[in-house]
Amino acid sequence: MTRRGLLLILSSPSGAGKSTLSRMLMAWDPTMRFSVSATTRKPRPGEVDGREYWFRSREAFQAMVDQGQMLEHAEVFGNFYGSPRAPVEAAMQAGTDTVFDIDWQGGQQVKQAMRGDVVSIFILPPSIAELDRRLRTRGQDSDEVIAGRMAKSRDEISHWAEYDYVLVNDDVERSFDNLKTILTAERLKRERQPQLSAFVRALNEEFEAR
């Protein structure tokens, strides 16, 4: 029996561990695909169209939005970002799960577009002090940028109750185990296995043939 692929949304404030858990999940199950976003920003050195992002002009991006070809989209710092619908739907039909690393606003748009095909998980830090420590130990951002990320985190965390599952990432291995458990259970749900009805009919036919 084959099943329909699901859409797994992972959201968290910056520094809570969303990207780390996404990478661990993809390594655990290489059959999963990561949703590649489209953007109107210019490629950075080393970036490849279709790998990091689908790079599009503002006109082409807006045309995709107008034609309903985006599952979600938003403007961030003057550039548009969004998730193209076609590759996601093709993966679902093939029984392939897609991972989305997006914020709560994008997650809400995807849920509205795809309804029962979405599983959403919000990842919380164990404390705000630990969140601040993780951002600083990464060594990637200035104090000003870190302050901005921390200020934004409060609003992001306020949307935790809009998700199907919530994980407190105090230990990354334990959080990863819980993430795998959620995904395994969701894959086994009856409504995600469209051939079950035909399978049960065949079982009943066996009963009648005895």
Image: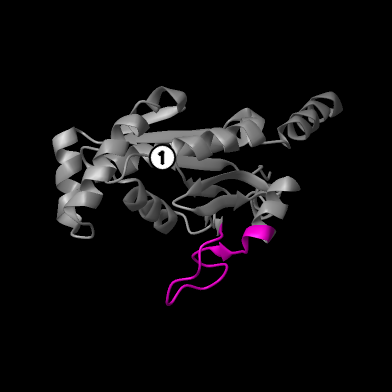
Quadrant holding the C terminus: top right
The foreground one among 158 and 195 is 158
> Residue 181, percent across and down?
41, 37
Residue 64's place in the image compared with 55, above or below, is above
Q: Residue at x 37, y 29 (%)?
A: 166
Range of residues picked out in magenta: 39-59
Residue 120 appears in the picture as rendered? yes
Residue labelled with disc 1: 11
The foreground one among 15 and 56 is 56
Could you tell me what secondary structure mostly forms the magenta stretch? loop
Figure coloring:
one colour
Label 1 crowd bin: few (<14), some (14–19), many (20+), radius 10 Å = many
> Residue 64, percent across and down?
70, 53
Q: Amino acid at mark 1?
A: Ser
> Residue 175, percent across and down?
30, 39
The foreground one among 91 and 17 is 17
Residue 188 appears in the picture as rendered? no
Q: Residue at x 62, y 64 (%)?
A: 57
Residue 133's place in the image compared with 48, above or below, is above
Residue 23's place in the image compared with 191, above or below, is below
